[in-house]
Image: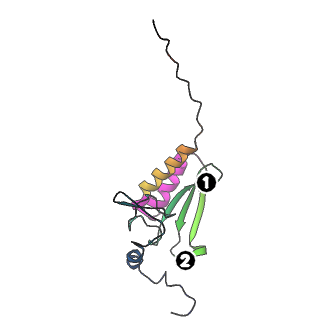
Amino acid sequence: LSRGRHFAGKMSADLQWMILRNNSCFLLRNQGTTFTKEPLNLAGRHSFKHSGLVNKKAIGVTADPKGKGVVLTTKKTKYANKPPKNLTKVTVASDSRRTVKTIKNLCGKNFYRRDLEDAAVRRACAILRSQRTTTGVQKKRTRRKRN
């Protein structure tokens, strides 16, 4: 390897996982279960399958900063050792059915990560549900006490 090249693209995903498995700033340990706060981890579980740092292909679904829609983030395998060019972000601000369709097309039909399709759809639906405006809360009427 010549000088100035990063070794991250040259290591296998398994070797990276062995290094990051117990040493990561994203780890959260709670009552025997290990969670993670990685940006491209859909499930929040600390496992090789869900890790966005280690896998060449990863999907992230986050809320749009404007409050309308979701931001769909994917990793490009071509730029594995160039972090600034590594991520592609697309804002999907249409209705929930079209958002789900977009995610399913990306994961399933493009053969990107079929195993993460369900988790990505669930995360997007939860974000869209939280962005819905409430129609107003009805007050509970107190009953009159009888003597």
Q: Is residue 8 above or below residue 70?
A: below
**Residue marked by disc 2:** 79
Question: Quick one: quadrant of the C terminus?
Answer: top left
Give the structural element (helix, strand or loop) at label 2. Answer: loop
Residue at 47% in and 63% down: 110
Give the structural element (helix, strand or loop) at label 1. Answer: loop
Dot 1, crowdedness within 10 Å: few (<14), some or many (≥20)?
some
**The image quarter in which residue 84 lies:** bottom right
Q: Position of residue 75 (x, y in %)?
A: 52, 69
Q: Is residue 3 above or below residue 110?
A: below
The colouring scheme, among rainbow, by chain, secondary structure or one colour, is: rainbow
Residue at 53% in and 43% down: 129
Three-letter amino acid code at the position of disc 2: Tyr
Residue 32 vs residue 4: left or right? left
**Residue marked by disc 1:** 64
Q: Position of residue 78 (x, y in %)?
A: 53, 77
The first of marks 1 and 2 along the sequence is: 1
Residue at 48% in and 69% down: 25
Three-letter amino acid code at the position of disc 1: Asp
Dot 2, crowdedness within 10 Å: few (<14), some or many (≥20)?
some
